[in-house]
Amino acid sequence: MDKSLLLGAVTEYPSRYSPEVLHAIPRSEGRQVLGISGEPKFFGFDLWTGYELSWLDMRGKPVVAVAEISMPCDTVNLVESKSLKLYLNSLNQERYRSAQDISALLEEDIAKCVVGPVQVGIHMADSFRHRGIGTFHGICLDDLPIEVDTYLPDASLLGFASRETVVTESLYSHLLKTNCPVTGQPDWASILIRYTGWPIDREGLLRYLISFRNHQDFHEQCVERIFTEISELCAPEHLDVYARYTRRGGLDINPYRSSRNTEAPRLRMSRQ
């Protein structure tokens, strides 16, 4: 494990603007484990929500807001979550003229870290509430009466319900739990599996998602593993995998991977 990671380390919050605290993690490291080299066979993005964004206006009065930070999954790097938290908080005592200036600053600094394009939307506290609370559309798997005894990823749990008719369906679960590979802290998520292909066995799919319960990896890499293993074992014509993780340290991370260059619904779940 990279010893320079800030996760799990005792660190001081910078008192002034500090873009140098942003720490990059090469995406290639996690993808090598999955046998992915070169350009991945999926599209998508990582959507971060920063709930602890604040700065001073030109009169020194604090402004508070929420940042939505989106980066495509083909940037060279991830940004380490704790370093992003420290960076956002380094703006607390700086004066800026407008939210647009903050947005442009974040886009420039984070883009340098991840080596790729970044889009940032800034929402004032009262306006962000209009985004509302939603849920995935489709069939929830969580009430299936299954027996579970596997808590490390096991792709052999995946299979077909039949191979007679191609279907298009959306299946989701609120039972995904993974763990930070550095601190071991739990990460909780709701996950959507949307596909066209032979019907996937729903009980097996739910057991498979639950099998990540003791797995340690970054959010983005967990979603890419789920996408890759479903793609390889179930061979759907089209596949979308979208996880909405709960926030930790004032940030939530929501990776979306798709076999098509399509958008994911931008919603907040009840646990976010």
Image: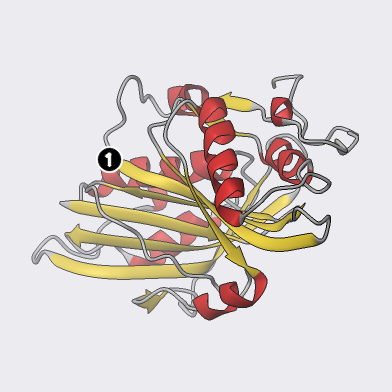
The amino acid beneath tag 1 is: Glu
| Image quadrant where residue 228 sits | top left
Circle 1 crowding by C-alpha within 10 Å: few under 14, some 14–19, many from 20: few
Q: Is residue 216 left or right of residue 222?
A: right
* Residue in the picture at 88% in, 33% down: 11
Q: Is residue 189 left or right of residue 143?
A: right
Q: Is residue 110 above or below residue 140?
A: above
Q: Which residue is mark 1?
A: 232
* Residue in the picture at 31% in, 30% down: 40
Label 1: element kind? helix
Q: Quadrant of the N terminus?
A: top right
Residue 132 in view, yes or no: no
Q: Where does the image place residue 164, in percent across and percent down from the top left?
A: 8, 64
| Image quadrant where residue 5 sits | top right
Q: Is residue 154 above or below residue 34?
A: below
Q: Who is closer to the viewer here, 106 or 22?
A: 106
Q: Is residue 104 above or below residue 57?
A: above
* Residue in the picture at 18% in, 64% down: 162
Q: Who is closer to the viewer here, 57 or 249?
A: 57
Q: Is residue 264 left or right of residue 123?
A: left
Q: Quadrant of the C terminus?
A: bottom right
